[in-house]
Image (cartoon, helix red, strand yellow):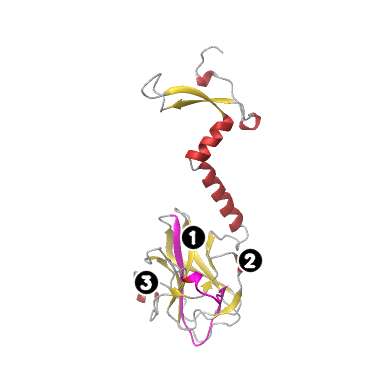
Amino acid sequence: MADSSIPSLGALTGANSASADLTNVVDVSDTTAAAAGTDKKMTLAELATGLITHGSLATETYAKNAAGLWLASQPTGALGATGDRALVNGNNLSILSYGGLHLSSIVLPAGLTITNISFVSGSTALTGGTYQWFGIFTDALNIGRLTADATSAAWPANTAKTLALTSAYVTPYAGLYFLGASCTTGGGPTLTGYGYSALTHIGLSPVLSGLSSSGVTTPGSCPDPVGAPVVGHRAYAWVT
């Protein structure tokens, strides 16, 4: 084959390629030809092996596909959730009836723009409410963004409630966050989520759900950072 520049070569599509097809690589560990490395040939099969071994392409692609498939089973428009909707095992969890701030963990990617948080009431509706609000918190328990106070607005039983953040929140890192809910009530609401009868594994660090700061009333009274959650049931919630 005569010497040719790469731009002058004919094109080959990925669909028409074969594992034995060759591509050009520069072996930087071989300085026989030049200090910058030596040109060598590599089959596409070996190139794929190299990307898996030394790169994150395959892992990232799998993670994105897996996340997309998981979110497809969540409520329409959900960008992340505190758990698998199909595995919810309780709709009468007494999470908010004592007031304070309850946290449930959620894993989110970096750069995600969030404008709303949703929780689902259980079989007991809100009665006699004086305040109710949600928020998103970092893994260090700092406030990311809070919603406005919905005060005494109705929250019927077995109903999803969505509250808007005071402004859009863009996740600054990939990893663990917490969704918080706070409500002072005359009774209820219970929440839908994941009830735990044996809490040993849930108590491992970091604790992923439970009562955080007690004595919290309105959003303006929320400390920053909030308290670490004490082991407890996990609410089903999601962000959009």
The residue beneath circle 2 is: 86
Which percent across, then down, holds residue 85?
Answer: 60, 66
Magenta part of the protein: which range?
174-202
Vertical relation: 124 (above or below) 115:
below
Residue 130 lies, in percent from the top left, at 45, 83
Which residue ends up furthest to the front in the rendered image?
200
If the image is split into quadrants, where does the N terminus sit? top right
Say which quarter of the image contains residue 16.
top right
Task: Assign a secondary structure to mark 3.
Answer: loop
- Say which of 18 and 167 sits in front: 18
Question: Residue 192: horizontal and vertical position, in percent?
Answer: 57, 74
- Quarter assignment of residue 84: bottom right
Q: Residue furthest top?
A: 2
Marks 2 and 3, Cα distance to the nearest angstrom? 30 Å
| Mark 1 residue element | strand
**Badge 1 or badge 3: first in the primary sequence:** 1
Q: Badge 1 is on which residue?
A: 107
Residue 226's disc is 3
Q: Amino acid at mark 1?
A: Val
Lower position in the chain sequence, tag 2 or tag 3: 2
29 on left or right of 96: left
Residue at the image point whose x is 57% and y is 30% from the top: 44
Q: What mark, if any, has residue 137 been given in the picture?
A: none
- Reading the chain from its start, which is encountered first: label 2 or label 1? 2
Rendered residue at 55%/32% (across/down): 46
Question: Callout 3, which amino acid?
Answer: Val
- Residue type at mark 2? Ala
**Front residue (pair 199, 55):** 199
Pointer 3 local density, CA inside 10 Å: few below 14, some 14–19, many at least 20: some
